[in-house]
Amino acid sequence: MRTKVYYMCAVLLMLSLLTPAGFSQNAQEEHLVGWWLFDDEKDEIGNWADVTLHGAKIEAGQLVVETGKWAHALDYTGPDITELTLATWVSLDDYAKTNGSALTLDKVTADQFCAIVWAERVDKQWMPGSSHFRRTQDFPDAVTEKPTGEMVFLAITYKDVKKQYEITGYRNGKSLGSFVMGDLRTWPAGDAEAIWGKRHVNGLAGPGELNAHIEESRIYNVALTEDEIQSLELGTLSVEPQGKLTTQWAKLKTK
């Protein structure tokens, strides 16, 4: 009997060593409310209408935005979003100070948004954009980007701390620091849109531009932890045809 137990333990250890690094991405699976791979216009979760392209284009598995060319997804049907995580993989084509966004969560009926914004306050730095700067400060450890055309993984989390947001930024999994600012807001079903390129919009017009290739974007309705942020990799979740997440993890994209 003891030999059998030892054998079972050895097998479990071997399986754990063979588990792919991306397996840990099932953390907060149930809170992933928007997921865009940009192989087409669809949200893989099925909570958003297809991406509408306003001059932007989908090319070779990436969303390409330029000055005057942006995109958004409307008709959100998922659960309310109060706590949140914005995550996106982006490569800049132009390092000019254009104030646009690599991913925005915007409320359709009000001036209420959170965004991953390029260089609105400080040249060549990513920052947390928000309506009237209500949820905006410069991250203590913000990185000044060099014009290398590097694909960078950016994430901003918004955690409920005593009815205010604790806002933390990440670049390639490394924390850029945190601050507490702004009262809690909610983006409900039927009153939310995801935006790429523009900082935010009112209908079909709004400020900010971005010149970039965006590989993948995600919205969670929870603030991911640092360990969970570090577990995220491009295209490593899988979905069933209806957009329902499975528990089988495999790369969908090979670049």
Image (tube, rainbow, N blue to C red):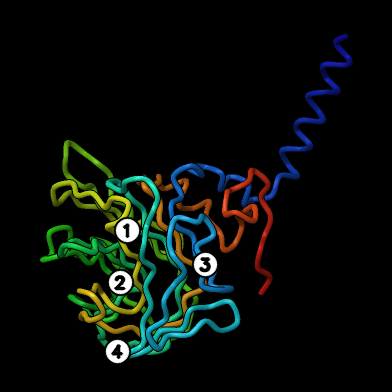
* Residue name at image x 36 percent, y 82 percent: 70
First-in-chain label (4 vs 1) = 4
Residue holding disc 1: 169
First-in-chain label (1 vs 3) = 3
Q: Is residue 153 above or below residue 232?
A: below
* Residue name at image x 36 percent, y 61 percent: 75
SS at badge 4? loop
Residue holding disc 2: 126
Disc ID at residue 42:
3
Callout 1: few (<14), some (14-19), or many (20+) C-alpha neighbours within 10 Å?
many
* Residue name at image x 51 percent, y 72 percent: 41
Q: Nearer the viewer, residue 120 or 210?
A: 210
Residue holding disc 4: 96
* Residue at mark 1 to residue at mark 2: CA–CA distance: 9 Å
Q: Is residue 64 left or right of residue 255?
A: left
* Residue at mark 1 to residue at mark 3: CA–CA distance: 27 Å
Q: Nearer the viewer, residue 225 or 182?
A: 182
Mark in the foreground, 2 or 3:
3
Q: Residue 249: image x %, image y %?
A: 66, 50
First-in-chain label (2 vs 4) = 4
First-in-chain label (3 vs 4) = 3
First-in-chain label (1 vs 2) = 2
Three-letter amino acid code at disc 4? Ala
Mark in the foreground, 3 or 4:
3
Q: Residue 2: image x %, image y %?
A: 85, 10
